[in-house]
Amino acid sequence: MSELSFLYINGLLEILNEDTGAFIVDERALFRPAGLAAFGRSRGGHLEDDPRLGRTVTVQRVESMVAEFAAIEQGMMLQNLGLMAEAMGLGGFPNFANHEYAWFESLGFRMSSMRASRYLSMPGWVGMLLSWTGRDVPVPLPLGLQVEEHWLMRA
């Protein structure tokens, strides 16, 4: 989880200053100025509103830059935690492991499975077509974590 307000504010202050002078347009409003028309150079302001100069950026691009900066920061923190754990002899380097069920299997969860067509709520005829072609694969599902007789987590 990232707190993006700080990055947004600092990013806007950086790209809207006198040195950078980027001009932000709203691609969802036919590329009209995003509330910055009065600050364009053509109206006496300091922002470069001439798209030929390469300082025009869309709202979507600004949002993408903020998200990328947040992801970079999180990646650096994860790398530092991994290096620290490795230096302490607690394990290897952490890698990104986005897998829907492998972690549950590794931790000993009781597992079941469901056909992909049902898991994805496909119409019945699509499920039949997938079955006939051998493509309606089973999708593993965690049911819960049980230690001895006690359920610690249950779906």
Image: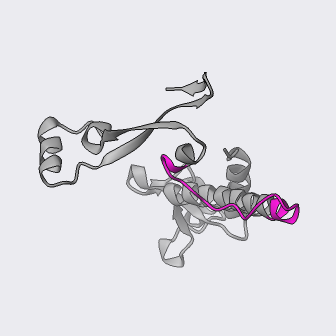
Depth check, front residue: 153 or 15: 153
Please name the predominant secondary structure of the magenta segment in the image: loop
Q: Is residue 134 visible?
A: yes
Depth check, front residue: 18 or 130: 130
Q: Position of residue 147 (x, y in %)?
A: 63, 29
Name the residue rendered at 81%, 58% in the picture.
Answer: 90
Depth check, front residue: 85 or 42: 85
Say which quarter of the image contains residue 78: bottom right
Q: What is the magenta range?
A: 83-102
Q: Position of residue 8 (x, y in %)?
A: 67, 51
Depth check, front residue: 18 or 71: 71
Image position of 49 (left or right of 83): left
Say which quarter of the image contains residue 114: top left
Image position of 45 (left or right of 25): right
Name the residue rendered at 51%, 71% in the picture.
Answer: 50
Say above or below: 85 vs 109: below
Identity of the residue furthest to the front in this view: 148
Q: Is residue 16 visible?
A: no
Q: Is residue 145 magenta?
A: no
Q: So how many labels did they put on this image? A: 0
Identity of the residue furthest to the bottom in this view: 53
Name the residue rendered at 49%, 46% in the picture.
Answer: 101
Say above or below: 127 vs 69: above
Please name the colour scheme applied to the rendered image: one colour
Identity of the residue furthest to the top in this view: 150
Q: Position of residue 32 (x, y in %)?
A: 44, 55
Say above or below: 147 vs 78: above
Where is the N terminus found, in terms of image quarters?
top right
Say above or below: 39 vs 19: above
